[in-house]
Image (cartoon, coloured by chain):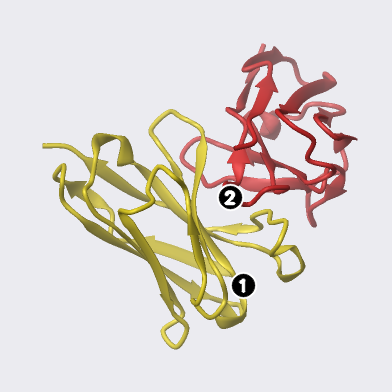
Chain colours: A yellow, B red
Amino acid sequence: EVQLVESGGGLFQPGGSLRLSCAASGFNFGGYWMHWVRQAPGKGLEWVSRINSDGSNTIYADSVKGRILVSRDNAKRTLYLQLSSLRAEDTAVYYCATVPPQQWLAPYFDYWGQGTLVTVSS
Amino acid sequence: DIQMTQSPSSLSASIGDRVTITCRASQSISTYLNWYQQKPGKAPKVLIYEVSRLESGVPSRFSGSGSGTDFTLTISSLQPEDFATYYCQQSYSTLPITFGQGTRLEIK
């Protein structure tokens, strides 16, 4: 069974930084491209980032570019998101998600984690 | 960026009703259009990918159609478990991937 479990959320100060993790199991993690999607409270879905299977290529949304680093450790089957210079508008549930192998260039998200809530507030 | 606009933003319907939700793209996205269902406190779940391909395990009362800029999600006979928020998502351009603003489907 595919499982994605995010962790690392919590209350963070404006201007601070965070690192989220997404632990994967039940599939060949090292062979999959992975994405982060976030959802502000009561709002819609916002795509954040994509990383390819070996971690050599990443792309980011403009809203986080310059403040974000997404990486992965395939040996640990874990995806990471580091976000700095936190702003109130970064407050959201952060989801990691997978894309079916045949869909990497035109992705849809077939498995999602349960999400981890990040709150940026003083 | 490709803007995705859903209509209506909210909808009230009864069990057994046929419901249609529309998604319009700001430019042609061919058939790279996907639909998700999200219930409160839960992650989204994919229903349909590439306009009309039903994800495994999704009931056949869900269907999708369209191409280019205009797309629809249809639920042929609403069931109690279908009351949720629905999102469209384009995968024609992956930088960035964009979602519609959502359509909240409520019980009348």
- Decide: is A88 above or below B104: below
Q: Nearer the viewer, residue B24 or B35?
A: B24
In the picture provided, is A103 more to the left or to the right than A10? right
Q: Is residue A100 above or below residue A13?
A: below
Q: Residue furthest bottom?
A: A75
Residue at numbered disc 2: B95
Q: Position of residue B4 (x, y in %)?
A: 66, 30
Residue B28 lies in quadrant: top right
Q: Is residue A73 visible?
A: yes
Image location of residue B87, percent across then percent down:
64, 34
Q: CA distance from mark 1 to mark 2?
A: 30 Å
**Relative image position of residue B5 (x, y in whole percent):** 66, 24
Residue located 64% across and 47% down the image:
B45
User: Residue at position x 24%, y 57% from top?
Assistant: A18
Which label was assigned to residue A1?
1
For image coordinates 49% across by 76% down, the residue present is: A55
Chain on which label 2 sits: B
**In the drawing, does residue A16 fall left or right of residue A93?**
left
Q: Amino acid at mark 2?
A: Leu
Instruction: Name which quarter of the figure residue A121 lies in.
Output: top left
